[in-house]
Amino acid sequence: MDDTQKRSYLRPLDWRQGRVDMTHGSGGRASAQLVDELFLRAFDNDWLRALNDQACFLVSSGRMVAATDSHVVSPLFFPGGDIGCLSVHGTINDVAMAGAKPLYLTAGFILEEGFPLSDLQRIVDSMAAAAREAGVAVIAGDTKVVEQGKGDGVFITTTGIGVVPEGLYISGDRARPGDRVLLSGTIGDHGVAIMSLREDLRFGTTVASDTAALHGLVTTMVEAVPDIHCLRDPTRGGLATTLNEIAQQSRVGMRIREVPIPVRPQVRAACEFLGLDPLYVANEGKLVAICPPEAAERLLAVMRAHPLGADAAIIGEVVDDRHHFVEMETAFGGRRMVDWLTGEQLPRIC
Amino acid sequence: MKYVDEFRDATLARGLAHAIAAEACSHRDYHLMEFCGGHTHAISRHGIQDLLPPNIRLIHGPGCPVCVLPIGRVDSAIALALDHGVILCTYGDVLRVPASEHMSLLKAKAAGADVRMIYSSLDALRIAQENPDREVVFFAIGFETTTPPTAAVIRQAKAMEVKNFTVFCNHVLTPAAIRKILDSTAPEEGIRGAQGARLDGIIGPSHVSTVIGSRPYEFVAEEYQRPVVIAGFEPLDVMQSILMLIRQINAGRAEVENEFIRAVSRDGNFKAQSLMAEVLETRPAFEWRGLGTISHSALRINTAYGDFDTERRFSIPYRAVADHKGCECGAILRGVKEPRDCRLFGTACTPENPVGSCMVSSEGACAAHYTYGRYRDYRDAGPTRKAVND
């Protein structure tokens, strides 16, 4: 560089007043600046620092898993979390439900022109903190900007890669008649937390989203009971939909009991006046486990010993049923079916 | 949850179940109709039928607001949204009601109509105030429970001189529908008619009765000699009211009794009634889905509030539309058939793709049976049942 030539000056991004504009998605200097001042700083690691269009990493022998999840939650910030940590937890959990240890994440951002940079920073910092806490590196990413009115602030798509410990074969098609159905904790917390903030509903509640990364809980579970048959996190569609999915995949039926299913009183109250059934309300930090009957009590004890499974319960069993119905003994003493969710209970819950 | 758990107590339920089983005569059947969809939902969701002896049959009545909404009225609402370009506001369940030519308000929305789901009639007025250059229509439906809020919002719109707000009024009246159902039983054949179901007693509406009181049902006992027990929506309310009906039937009594004394009086809510009377008037006749045209069975906006009547502001010709030929909703709403008797049930007609109105709302007889009870069709009839349904 010629000594007399000034190094081109780049005004730092204004994190207090600034807003996303179209140049941030142009691929030019402004995009590079956003990557440098925001994403690199937050997610800092060797893969990102290399500034390549891809991340190269070593693979171990054995089975790997990949999962991808898009996040469009509204509002972006809610009690217990925000779209940032949710986008990390959601994908980590999908990876973990194979019994896998999640290793890497990639993240794609679709930003709306005019979105405050301060909010974006908050979201990215929350993602970075969630990823750090989970011991997972965000190794690649992409940012696009759409015109004002064509998006809703920010949408985030994350992809996760993990590795399955040897000897584990966890899959939704492995439930067998006689297996026990376990649930890791209270249902409906995330859905009710989001609903309480919606413009047209707005009600006061102390319920916070349960958004959490579940791979730590899963690790302790598979160490204690390597023969877990199925794991799944009941997100959209709630517990009811997850049980039906597994029943369908495994070509079995289920008999569950309403009494042991943990529901917070605030969630029950909110569902009561909104006319919702907590069985269908979304969760972001809970899992359903299906295991052989002889292992159920051991698995329950391990789950309860973990902070994310303190309220775990055995809620039912897998039965032979060619119609793949999920039946429930109600708290009132009758019986009924627990069917798939019909229609849309609440759009943009995650 | 206080004031809810007390009415869902399994121990008390078992006690009531024993009492019902002990008092129900084993040599006869009891055909009881719960008029309200709210009761239908409670019965299905809590599995109440399992706590009753097999000779007590619960018939799911027509008290589901979206189920009785005729196709023609939904067509009109769709035309308002698509052809007149209004912002159409309505309650969530209405969006999925099937209309003509495979349309629904939800599909109209996808086709570009401005349809908004609201939780309260006041939301519609707020939307009108926020969009002063757009016409905003509140597509109002429901029984007497949701009528006072509609009347209130019309009165408020007038007081605030909101010019771009009208109400497409489709409110219907419970007693008229009960009379229609009772008329469809032929007295000369005793209590079983050619058109109607056998009906031994009625579990009376819960929320509707908080507004209108218990007095409007007295004709059922006096003219038709059938007992009515007004019941709350909690499962123990339903069990208790069944026991009270059995006692009346066994004693040969036909009276209006009130199980829901914590909320219902004989005269109802005067304030709500006077509000409705101030703004609304009875229509000479109104079409009900499944029940046909019933005289003096619905409400419209009166002349004093005529400026807020969608039917006066817009030209929306009404065209009655027949139900799908194979659909048994009419017979199901009258209690003549059960959902599983319909050949469309669970095949062409499901909650995802409802053909008939009873499949639309979770309070509808078919949707409740599909969602909560259809496994019984297979259990009761063994392995051949599926073939029958398919």
Image (tube, grey):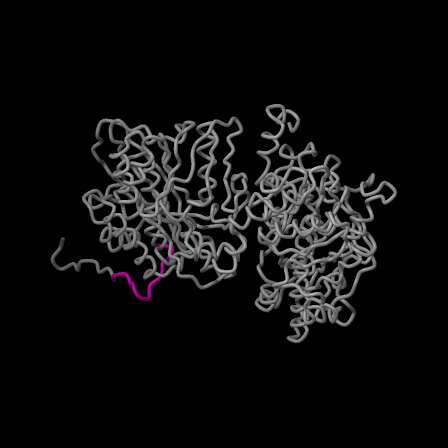
Which segment is the magenta one? A12-23
Considering only vertical position in the picture, is B357 above or below B388?
below
Res A57 quadrant in image? top left
Residue at the extreme right: B188
State which quadrant residue B150 falls in.
bottom right
Image position, residue B137 (x, y; %)? 66, 61
Left or right of residue B235: residue A165: left
User: What x and y, as percent, mark residue B345?
Assistant: 65, 35
Give the residue drawn at x 59%, y 62%.
B120
Drawn side of residue A94 relative to residue A347, left or right: left
Q: How many labels were placed on the picture?
A: 0
Q: Residue B296's spot in the image, x, y percent?
A: 81, 58
In the picture, residue B230 is in which quadrant? Answer: bottom right
Residue occupying the far left of the picture:
A3
In the image, A82 versus B38, the foreground residue is B38
Q: Secondary structure of the magenta portion, mostly?
A: loop
Q: Nearer the viewer, residue B48 or B310?
A: B48
Foreground residue among A296 and B253: B253
Q: Position of residue B217 (x, y in %)?
A: 75, 58
Image quarter hosting the C terminus of chain B? top right
| Residue under the image location 54 percent in, 40 percent down | A335
Q: Would you say residue B241 sits in the magenta stretch?
A: no
Residue A17 located within the stretch drawn in magenta: yes
Residue sitting at x 71%, y 65%: B266
Q: Nearer the viewer, residue B340 or A122?
A: B340
